[in-house]
Amino acid sequence: MKIYGFRVPLMASLIVWIALWEVIGRTGAALVLPPFSSVVERMVEIVPTPTFLKALAMTGEAYLIGNLIAIGIGVPVGVLMGRSVVADRLLLPWVNIFLSAPLSALVPVIMVLFGLGMTTIVLTVVLFAVWIIVLDARAGVRGISPSLVEMARSYGATPLQAFAKIYLWAALPEILAGIRLGCIRAVKGVIIGQLLVSIVGFGHLFEIYFSNFLMEHFWALVLTLFAFAFAIAEGLGYLERRVEYYASSRQQ
């Protein structure tokens, strides 16, 4: 990024926002928005505690299971929509509706069907993550050259073999992009699930900190979640860049 001819690192904007947060936190707004330095100190204090680690384990379990289910459903459905006109016309309107809908409003419905427990939290994660995975997998498959599909058919490949050898690998850049976005959305899903369904994990910590007005603890937990989501996005983004060559080779 260049400003007036000078090259400015992308992290510079983050530093500016941190400085602004620190200044605002030392004014009368400190009751709601404490200084950034105090939040960081509190984050270093609470992360090693048994309470935090227990909440992390519960949240991480629901997050991981939900994402695996979303990927296991989203990728095959997206591939099917990309290759089948009938399936695409039947499913695409519903996928677009759920992608743009306020999904938090559907959580009480899941609670009625599956009760107050881990199952509902996992399904909430799936609900938030799966739709973008479906759409990106569909987009990747629709970008595959027909010659690759014809070649697979000429060699007598079964639908399962074509999925594993052609569609999955040729659409891999878009599939990984969808998984990355789905994993980011799943962070919101797991927290909403733990807050609305059963106050456990990080949802329990948010409830305690907010109800007792422990705003330094509250914002420390928010920053921890932001760092977690950023690390996931950057890690999967690195994988996307590693497989970019598939995007060009699939057109051959």
Image: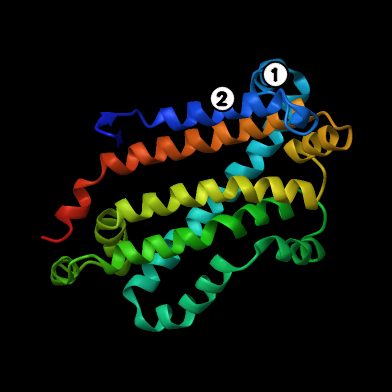
Which of pointers 1 and 2 lies earlier in the amino acid sequence?
Answer: 2
Q: Position of residue 79 (x, y in %)?
A: 37, 66
Residue 62, placed above or below residue 103 = above
Asked whether the viewer can see residue 10, the reply is yes
Q: Position of residue 37 (x, y in %)?
A: 65, 18
Residue type of the residue flagged with mark 2: Ala
Q: Quadrant of the C terminus?
A: bottom left
Color scheme of the displayed model: rainbow
Residue type of the residue flagged with mark 1: Ser
The residue where tag 2 is placed is: 19
Residue 37, placed above or below residue 159 = above
Q: Residues within 10 Å of mark 2 (few under 14, many from 20)?
A: some
Mark pair 1, 2: CA separation:
13 Å
Q: Residue at x 28, y 34 (%)?
A: 4
Query: Which residue occupies the foreground of this view, 117 or 55?
Result: 55
Q: Position of residue 173 (x, y in %)?
A: 30, 51
Asked whether the viewer can see residue 53, the reply is no
Residue 156, placed above or below residue 15 = below
Q: Residue at x 54, y 76 (%)?
A: 94
The residue where tag 1 is placed is: 38
Label 2 secondary element: helix
Res 236 quadrant in image: top left
Q: Position of residue 156 (x, y in %)?
A: 18, 69
Res 11 quadrant in image: top left
